[in-house]
Image: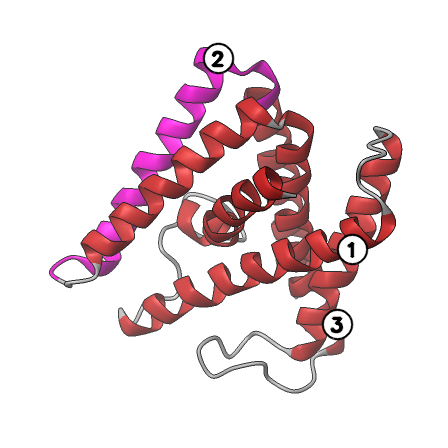
Amino acid sequence: MSQEITKRILSSIIIMASALFFIIKGSFFYIFFLLVFFFITIYEWYKMTKNKNYFIIGLIFFTLSFFSAFLLRNIFLLDFILVILICISSDIGGYVFGKIFKGPKLTKISPNKTFSGMIGSFFLSITSALLYTEYYNLVYWTGDILLIAVILISSFSQIGDLTVSYFKRKSKIKNTGKIIPGHGGVLDRIDGMLFAIPFAFILFNYL
Protein backbone atom coordinates (compact mmCIF):
# COMPACT_ATOMS: atom_id res chain seq x y z
CA MET A 1 0.00 0.00 0.00
CA SER A 2 2.78 2.42 0.94
CA GLN A 3 4.47 1.76 -2.41
CA GLU A 4 1.27 2.64 -4.26
CA ILE A 5 0.91 5.86 -2.29
CA THR A 6 4.54 6.77 -2.96
CA LYS A 7 4.16 5.98 -6.67
CA ARG A 8 1.00 8.06 -6.89
CA ILE A 9 2.54 11.06 -5.10
CA LEU A 10 5.73 10.93 -7.20
CA SER A 11 3.69 10.74 -10.39
CA SER A 12 1.65 13.75 -9.28
CA ILE A 13 4.79 15.77 -8.52
CA ILE A 14 6.34 14.94 -11.90
CA ILE A 15 3.13 15.76 -13.77
CA MET A 16 2.70 18.98 -11.79
CA ALA A 17 6.28 20.07 -12.56
CA SER A 18 5.89 19.26 -16.26
CA ALA A 19 2.51 20.98 -16.46
CA LEU A 20 3.88 24.08 -14.72
CA PHE A 21 6.69 24.31 -17.25
CA PHE A 22 4.28 24.40 -20.19
CA ILE A 23 1.73 26.59 -18.40
CA ILE A 24 4.31 29.22 -17.45
CA LYS A 25 5.98 29.08 -20.87
CA GLY A 26 2.65 29.69 -22.55
CA SER A 27 2.32 30.38 -26.27
CA PHE A 28 3.07 27.42 -28.54
CA PHE A 29 4.41 25.31 -25.66
CA TYR A 30 1.14 25.47 -23.75
CA ILE A 31 -1.00 24.87 -26.85
CA PHE A 32 1.13 21.83 -27.71
CA PHE A 33 0.79 20.54 -24.15
CA LEU A 34 -3.00 20.96 -24.19
CA LEU A 35 -3.39 19.29 -27.58
CA VAL A 36 -1.33 16.25 -26.54
CA PHE A 37 -3.40 15.79 -23.38
CA PHE A 38 -6.63 16.48 -25.28
CA PHE A 39 -6.05 13.81 -27.92
CA ILE A 40 -4.90 11.22 -25.37
CA THR A 41 -7.98 11.98 -23.26
CA ILE A 42 -10.31 11.64 -26.23
CA TYR A 43 -8.63 8.38 -27.25
CA GLU A 44 -9.05 6.93 -23.75
CA TRP A 45 -12.67 8.14 -23.63
CA TYR A 46 -13.31 6.55 -27.04
CA LYS A 47 -11.88 3.20 -25.92
CA MET A 48 -14.05 3.33 -22.82
CA THR A 49 -17.30 4.43 -24.48
CA LYS A 50 -17.10 3.33 -28.13
CA ASN A 51 -20.47 2.32 -29.53
CA LYS A 52 -22.13 4.13 -26.62
CA ASN A 53 -24.50 7.02 -27.27
CA TYR A 54 -22.83 9.20 -24.63
CA PHE A 55 -19.45 9.27 -26.41
CA ILE A 56 -20.40 12.47 -28.28
CA ILE A 57 -21.61 14.16 -25.09
CA GLY A 58 -18.25 13.46 -23.46
CA LEU A 59 -16.38 14.64 -26.55
CA ILE A 60 -18.22 17.98 -26.50
CA PHE A 61 -17.71 18.39 -22.76
CA PHE A 62 -13.99 17.61 -22.91
CA THR A 63 -13.54 20.02 -25.81
CA LEU A 64 -15.18 22.81 -23.82
CA SER A 65 -13.12 21.90 -20.76
CA PHE A 66 -9.79 22.07 -22.59
CA PHE A 67 -10.85 25.32 -24.24
CA SER A 68 -11.64 26.70 -20.76
CA ALA A 69 -8.12 25.67 -19.68
CA PHE A 70 -6.68 27.58 -22.64
CA LEU A 71 -8.68 30.72 -21.83
CA LEU A 72 -8.18 30.55 -18.08
CA ARG A 73 -4.41 30.34 -18.38
CA ASN A 74 -4.29 33.39 -20.66
CA ILE A 75 -6.57 35.51 -18.47
CA PHE A 76 -5.70 34.45 -14.90
CA LEU A 77 -2.30 32.72 -14.91
CA LEU A 78 -1.66 32.60 -11.15
CA ASP A 79 -5.29 31.72 -10.47
CA PHE A 80 -5.17 28.97 -13.08
CA ILE A 81 -2.14 27.44 -11.34
CA LEU A 82 -4.11 27.71 -8.09
CA VAL A 83 -6.92 25.63 -9.64
CA ILE A 84 -4.47 22.95 -10.79
CA LEU A 85 -2.92 22.92 -7.30
CA ILE A 86 -6.34 22.51 -5.67
CA CYS A 87 -7.25 19.61 -7.96
CA ILE A 88 -3.98 17.77 -7.39
CA SER A 89 -4.15 18.41 -3.64
CA SER A 90 -7.72 17.12 -3.59
CA ASP A 91 -6.64 13.95 -5.35
CA ILE A 92 -3.62 13.31 -3.13
CA GLY A 93 -5.47 14.26 0.07
CA GLY A 94 -8.40 12.00 -0.78
CA TYR A 95 -6.16 9.07 -1.64
CA VAL A 96 -3.83 9.35 1.35
CA PHE A 97 -6.51 10.07 3.97
CA GLY A 98 -8.72 7.34 2.54
CA LYS A 99 -5.96 4.76 2.68
CA ILE A 100 -4.83 5.74 6.18
CA PHE A 101 -8.15 6.36 7.97
CA LYS A 102 -10.50 4.25 5.79
CA GLY A 103 -13.99 4.40 7.33
CA PRO A 104 -17.47 4.51 5.73
CA LYS A 105 -17.74 4.40 1.95
CA LEU A 106 -18.79 7.61 0.24
CA THR A 107 -20.75 6.07 -2.65
CA LYS A 108 -21.28 2.81 -4.51
CA ILE A 109 -20.11 4.47 -7.73
CA SER A 110 -16.51 4.27 -6.55
CA PRO A 111 -16.04 1.77 -3.68
CA ASN A 112 -12.58 3.14 -2.85
CA LYS A 113 -13.95 6.60 -2.04
CA THR A 114 -14.54 7.23 1.67
CA PHE A 115 -15.75 10.09 3.84
CA SER A 116 -12.28 10.33 5.36
CA GLY A 117 -10.89 10.70 1.85
CA MET A 118 -13.35 13.49 1.10
CA ILE A 119 -12.28 15.32 4.27
CA GLY A 120 -8.65 14.78 3.28
CA SER A 121 -9.35 16.28 -0.14
CA PHE A 122 -10.74 19.45 1.40
CA PHE A 123 -8.05 19.65 4.09
CA LEU A 124 -5.06 19.35 1.78
CA SER A 125 -6.54 21.59 -0.94
CA ILE A 126 -7.33 24.34 1.59
CA THR A 127 -3.86 24.06 3.15
CA SER A 128 -2.13 24.17 -0.25
CA ALA A 129 -4.23 27.12 -1.41
CA LEU A 130 -3.49 29.10 1.74
CA LEU A 131 0.27 28.56 1.35
CA TYR A 132 0.15 29.37 -2.36
CA THR A 133 -1.83 32.62 -2.05
CA GLU A 134 0.31 33.70 0.90
CA TYR A 135 3.54 33.02 -1.00
CA TYR A 136 2.44 35.01 -4.05
CA ASN A 137 0.72 37.65 -1.92
CA LEU A 138 -2.58 37.31 -3.80
CA VAL A 139 -4.34 39.81 -1.56
CA TYR A 140 -7.62 39.67 -3.52
CA TRP A 141 -8.06 36.13 -2.20
CA THR A 142 -9.33 37.07 1.24
CA GLY A 143 -9.98 34.41 3.86
CA ASP A 144 -13.70 33.80 3.32
CA ILE A 145 -13.57 34.11 -0.47
CA LEU A 146 -10.59 31.77 -0.72
CA LEU A 147 -12.18 29.19 1.58
CA ILE A 148 -15.45 29.15 -0.39
CA ALA A 149 -13.66 29.05 -3.74
CA VAL A 150 -11.38 26.18 -2.68
CA ILE A 151 -14.25 24.12 -1.29
CA LEU A 152 -16.28 24.64 -4.49
CA ILE A 153 -13.38 23.88 -6.84
CA SER A 154 -12.37 20.83 -4.79
CA SER A 155 -16.00 19.66 -4.80
CA PHE A 156 -16.21 19.89 -8.59
CA SER A 157 -12.88 18.07 -8.84
CA GLN A 158 -14.22 15.24 -6.68
CA ILE A 159 -17.46 15.17 -8.70
CA GLY A 160 -15.38 14.81 -11.86
CA ASP A 161 -13.50 11.91 -10.28
CA LEU A 162 -16.75 10.18 -9.34
CA THR A 163 -18.31 10.82 -12.76
CA VAL A 164 -15.44 9.21 -14.64
CA SER A 165 -15.45 6.36 -12.08
CA TYR A 166 -19.13 5.82 -12.90
CA PHE A 167 -18.41 5.44 -16.61
CA LYS A 168 -15.44 3.15 -15.87
CA ARG A 169 -17.76 0.89 -13.87
CA LYS A 170 -20.24 0.87 -16.74
CA SER A 171 -17.40 -0.17 -19.05
CA LYS A 172 -16.10 -2.71 -16.50
CA ILE A 173 -12.57 -1.32 -16.43
CA LYS A 174 -10.37 -0.20 -13.54
CA ASN A 175 -8.29 2.45 -15.35
CA THR A 176 -8.68 4.34 -18.61
CA GLY A 177 -5.07 3.56 -19.55
CA LYS A 178 -1.62 2.62 -18.26
CA ILE A 179 0.47 5.63 -19.22
CA ILE A 180 0.88 7.13 -15.71
CA PRO A 181 2.32 4.97 -12.86
CA GLY A 182 -0.01 4.85 -9.86
CA HIS A 183 -2.83 6.55 -11.75
CA GLY A 184 -3.55 4.65 -14.94
CA GLY A 185 -4.45 6.78 -17.93
CA VAL A 186 -4.43 10.51 -18.54
CA LEU A 187 -8.20 10.63 -18.06
CA ASP A 188 -7.78 8.92 -14.68
CA ARG A 189 -5.41 11.72 -13.69
CA ILE A 190 -7.24 14.78 -14.98
CA ASP A 191 -10.86 13.71 -14.48
CA GLY A 192 -11.30 16.17 -11.61
CA MET A 193 -9.66 19.01 -13.53
CA LEU A 194 -11.99 18.47 -16.48
CA PHE A 195 -14.89 19.46 -14.23
CA ALA A 196 -13.13 21.97 -11.95
CA ILE A 197 -11.53 24.13 -14.66
CA PRO A 198 -14.75 25.10 -16.53
CA PHE A 199 -16.37 25.89 -13.19
CA ALA A 200 -13.35 27.95 -12.09
CA PHE A 201 -13.42 29.85 -15.38
CA ILE A 202 -17.01 30.87 -14.74
CA LEU A 203 -16.28 31.59 -11.07
CA PHE A 204 -13.26 33.83 -11.75
CA ASN A 205 -15.08 35.78 -14.43
CA TYR A 206 -17.90 36.64 -12.04
CA LEU A 207 -16.03 36.76 -8.72
Q: Is residue 42 magenta?
A: yes
Residue depicted at 48% across the width and 20% down the height: 30
Q: Residue furthest bottom?
A: 104
> What's the magenta region?
23-51
Decide which of 84, 11 is in the foreground and name it.
84
* Amino acid beneath label 3: Ile
Q: Secondary structure at mark 2?
A: helix
Give the CA separation, mark 1 to mark 2. 31 Å
Q: Is residue 109 magenta?
A: no
* Amino acid beneath label 2: Ser
Q: Is residue 161 above or below residue 139?
A: below
Q: Is residue 136 above or below residue 58?
A: above
**Image position, residue 119 (x, y; %):** 73, 70
Q: Nearer the viewer, mark 1 or mark 2?
A: 1
Would you name the residue on which mark 2 appears?
27
What crowding class fits label 3: few (fewer than 14 Cα within 10 Å), some (14-19), or many (20 or more)? Answer: few
**Image position, residue 106 (x, y; %):** 58, 81
Q: Nearer the viewer, mark 2 or mark 3?
A: 2
145 left or right of 110 in image? right
Would you name the residue on which mark 3 appears?
100
* Amino acid beneath label 1: Leu
Residue depicted at 57% across the width and 45% down the height: 200
Mark number displayed over residue 87: none
The main secondary structure of the magenta stretch is helix
Would you name the residue on which mark 1 appears?
147
